[in-house]
Image: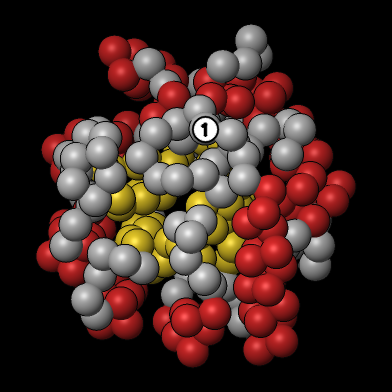
Amino acid sequence: MTINIAPSILSADFCNLERDLNAIANADLVHVDVMDHHFVPNLTLGEPIVKRICEVSPLPVDVHLMIEDPDRWAPEFAKCGAQSVTFHMGATHAPVRLARQLRDMGCKACFAVRPAEPVEPIFDILDEFDMILIMTVEPGFGGQKFLSNQMAKTRRLRDEITRRGLSTHIQVDGGVSRSTAHIVAEAGADVLVAGSAVYGAEDIAAEIDLIRANAEAAYRD
């Protein structure tokens, strides 16, 4: 399976956002974190800016909603042009209904699991989602230390996906870099979100290629 790299623009220069979007053109997705100052303490981007990002981005846009009431707002981000929209286990009231609504709109439906949350409760509805996001930091801020204890959870999820013959992707977000890419890939993740590791590099494009190469060398099929 191909490893996809999704740089997070949370670490980009928001005054030069189009420049920084073009700088990651050799990646696979643009990861956009939407935070509402309620579900998480930080506040980031709203629909108008996400819509504009979708219009100018050289890559498909992967929106991660860290907000309250995604049942109401997730479809609005799909309308903005996002290729995929992720919402959190602890925020939605009707995850299957929302996933089906997103898919009916032509948008991939994704489900996020925070570090303290188990992954097993979603096994029964795995086939409703295109991707599961395993958070390896607490959501809300970039640049946090990678939580390696989340890899056991990632392995259990990959085992379940493989056992059932599903095509569900596993995304890992938080502390991913050239030094941790092989760890998350070996555990079964195939979509890697990297923020500060990419945008803090001297050569952004080369760093993306290095993270991908390290992951591909270790990927657990």
Q: Residue 69: horizontal and vertical position, in percent?
A: 16, 62
As drawn, the residue found furthest toward the top would be 202
As displayed, is residue 31 above or below residue 207?
A: below
Q: Nearer the viewer, residue 30 or 125?
A: 125
As drawn, the residue found furthest toward the front would be 116
Q: Is residue 66 left or right of residue 157?
A: left
Q: Residue at x 66, y 89 (%)?
A: 164
Residue labelled with disc 1:
144
Q: Residue at x 63, y 73 (%)?
A: 157
Colour pattern of the rendering: secondary structure
As displayed, is residue 13 above or below residue 121?
A: above
Q: Amino acid at mark 1?
A: Gln
Q: Residue 155: horizontal and vertical position, in percent?
A: 71, 67
Residue 104 visible, this angle: no
Q: Residue at x 80, y 39 (%)?
A: 214
Q: Residue 195: horizontal and vertical position, in percent?
A: 52, 31
As displayed, is residue 131 above or below residue 95?
A: above
